Amino acid sequence: MVDWARARGLDLVGVVDPHAFDGCQPAGRRASDHVPDCESIIVLGSGGRRCWEHLNEIRPAEFADGPAEGHHPIDRWSLEVAEELAGALGDLADGHSIVLPNDDRTLNFVQLAEMAGFGTVSPVIHQLLHPDYGPWVSLRAALLLRTRPFAPFDPTTAAPFEPCHDCHKPCLLGCPVDAYSSTKGPFSVCADHRIAGGCADGCGVRRDCCIGREHRYGPNEEAFRHAYSLYVMRQIARGRGLLGIVRSLWRRR
């Protein structure tokens, strides 16, 4: 399955036990809310530039226009890949459900990613950090199954990864509005700043993280993703509220 996903630009694949996941989630945000007898969650993601390079190779015209309502080729392609995976599993995927981070009824993808072995959430900036890719990770889709074709990730087999433990935290200096020290919370402060025109070309916090700098998105990818996140922020500011910001931006990057 890992090789299958990698060939499609997704090099982060993990399997999560839905019972363990649901045990730490509130009602309405559990896997069982989507598939009542769920037995497996396959989590798909990408690190670094692989996903972008793959998509631009097979569908370059998709990125000719900037982000707009209903137009996000990475989301659409992620859904296609998850559906293709379900098709490849055949009867094992009967009654499956696919959830994307940007769905209205989504799941806590950061928690899923941690449980799938993709990395650890930074205690400083609260973003998922991969041991190699650092913050340059994008969570793409979750396939919920009523069967268990693969064993869930076993965290006891992974090498310890404790980001930020001995770090001098240059990431905090990368934020011009000191969002992570604000009593308003980083999400609200970041959104207000960006809607006002700040950080127009990328996120300084992400860029200044010590981990995975060699995997930073290229200029075109960073510009596209950043423009889309600003578009979503503006849409949310017109009426969807702060919870939408959390769901749409910080859990899907």
Image (spheres, rainbow, N blue to C red):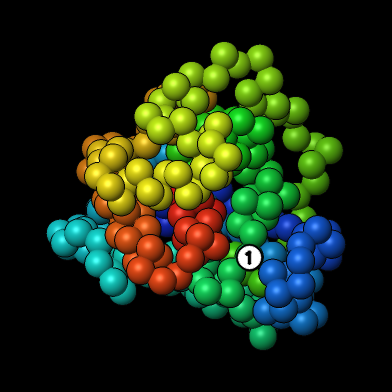
Most foreground residue, 191 or 121: 191
Residue 231 in sight here: yes
Most foreground residue, 167 or 82: 167
Res. 126 image quadrant:
top right
| 81 up-or-down from 109: above or below | below
Q: Residue furthest front?
A: 183
Residue 3 appears left or right of 176: right
**Which residue is found at the position 46% from the left and 54% from the top?**
249
Q: Amino acid at mark 1?
A: Leu
Q: Position of residue 91 (x, y in %)?
A: 67, 83
**Which residue is found at the position 16% from the left and 61% from the top?**
65
**Which residue is found at the position 45% from the left and 44% from the top?**
189
Res. 49 image quadrant:
top left
Q: Position of residue 208 (x, y in %)?
A: 43, 24
Number of numbered discs overlaid on the protein picture: 1
Residue 118 appears left or right of 187: right
| 241 up-or-down from 187: above or below | below
Res. 118 image quadrant:
top right
| 98 up-or-down from 210: above or below | below
Q: Position of residue 55 (x, y in %)?
A: 31, 56
Please identify the quadrant where the N terminus is shown: bottom right
Residue 233 appears left or right of 168: left
Give the labeled residue for mark 1: 107
Q: Secondary structure at mark 1?
A: loop
Q: Residue furthest bottom?
A: 95
Most foreground residue, 150 or 186: 186
Within 10 angstroms of label 1, few (less than 14), some, or many (20 or more) residues? many
Residue 133 in sight here: no
**Which residue is found at the position 51% from the left and 71% from the top?**
103
